[in-house]
Image (spheres, rainbow, N blue to C red):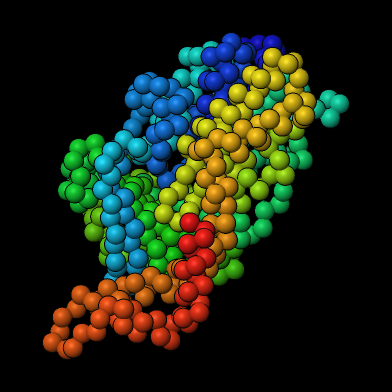
Amino acid sequence: MSLEGFEVAVVGAGPAGSAAALTLAREGVQVLLVERGTFPGSKNVFGGRIYSYALKRLLGDQWKDAPVERFIRKEGITFMTADSSFSIEYEAKDPKGSFTAVRAKFDKWLAEQAEKAGASLITDSRVDDLIVEGGNVRGIIAGQDKIPTDVVIACDGTTTSLARKAGLATMLEPEEVSMGMKDVIELPADKIEERFGLDPEEGAAHVFVGECSGGLRGGGFLYTNKDSLALGMVVGADDTSTKAVSSHTLMDRLRNLRKVRRFLRDGKTIEYDAHMIPEAGPKMLTRPYTGGMLVAGDAAGHLLNNGYTFRGVDMAIVSGVAAAQTILEARKRKDYSAQSLRAYERKLREEPALKDMYTFSRVPRYLRNNRLYNVYPELVCNAAEAIYRVDGNEKRKIYKELRAQTKGKVSTISLIRDLLAGARTF
């Protein structure tokens, strides 16, 4: 393959990169999609859930060909102590609003759609540097190859080296980074459906808060695939570092909790992964563009964790499309300067799906409140125990029981402050 004649180089064949390459290739742009793994998705780790709207926009009815594991019918959250739990569950009217997927299959499939549209994909190729001329990015350097292009889209993931080389990345504070870890546990489809109360092709997504993190900032998740479960934790990296808690310790704690153990019974762990997750949002970059380069997806902080939903793939796809659209407009003007590409930032802020990053921008700070993980889950479980227990003794009214449970654990002022802050944040 000739490595000259490309107008755009897209670095990273994850959802953002493939969506950008696909959008550009459809318009006849000569685009090169570069992936450092042996195939797209081979180096990507995530919980396993994708919101469908982004694919529907990108591919129309063709999105139905995506390698779906299960469509999410049930959503749930469980507050936990060492010996009790309190769960809330919602059953969706339309389960096709989101689905679980195996990233290695999904990313490969999406990259294939970009190739079919005309993009050129090369794998096993690590981009080490940028070609910079006159202060503008004019291509990439991969090993011994210098590949000149008009513009570059950096979709190289959380630890993006290209944004740093372009002077766009800021140093994240320790509390702005979380550690994600995940087990994939093999289990027959019929057992998954029986244990979660699902019909074939239906899935469940569940979040755990409290004892599972041992008081650390974070929580657990459990997603159903066709014949496996994705069980994981997301916890503050600063907490795990200062308290010297290993990922294996946290995962062992989660697996052995009674609520979780029942779901996993007779399952076999076939995969284990861990990676770092930025929680600074778009603030992880000084700006997502410079002369000759745009940054999209995880590399630009385009993901959201608001405590009950974890979103990354849908936002990556939407931001990749926005980057491609910005380049198409700049191409008409034959102008890839920073001034021309700054339209990308406006697109990101105006895109309804991405506005959530700004609407919920205060969530990470709110979620640093340790009472959310060690006080309130215990209060919820103890209150439920008192309300539902019948032992022949006189019972108090619910509001009196709730007040009694808070005494000595959290002041009324702190409780009200947390409630008000939560209402403003969410």
Left or right position of 415 against 190: right
Give percent across and percent down for residue 46: 46, 44
Left or right position of 197 against 52: left
**Residue drawn at the location 33% of the way across and 32% of the way down:** 68
User: Is residue 281 positioned above or below 243 on the image?
Assistant: above
Quarter of the image that includes the N terminus: top right
Give percent across and percent down for residue 423: 47, 62
Whether residue 228 can be seen here: no
User: Is residue 363 positioned above or below 41 on the image?
Assistant: below
**Residue drawn at the location 71% of the way across and 52% of the way down:** 171
**Residue drawn at the location 43% of the way across and 29% of the way down:** 55
Left or right position of 106 against 125: left
The foreground one among 341 and 119 is 341
User: Is residue 193 positioned above or below 401 on the image?
Assistant: above
The foreground one among 85 and 227 is 85
**Residue drawn at the location 31% of the way across and 50% of the way down:** 75
The foreground one among 345 and 234 is 345
Give percent across and percent down for residue 379: 36, 75
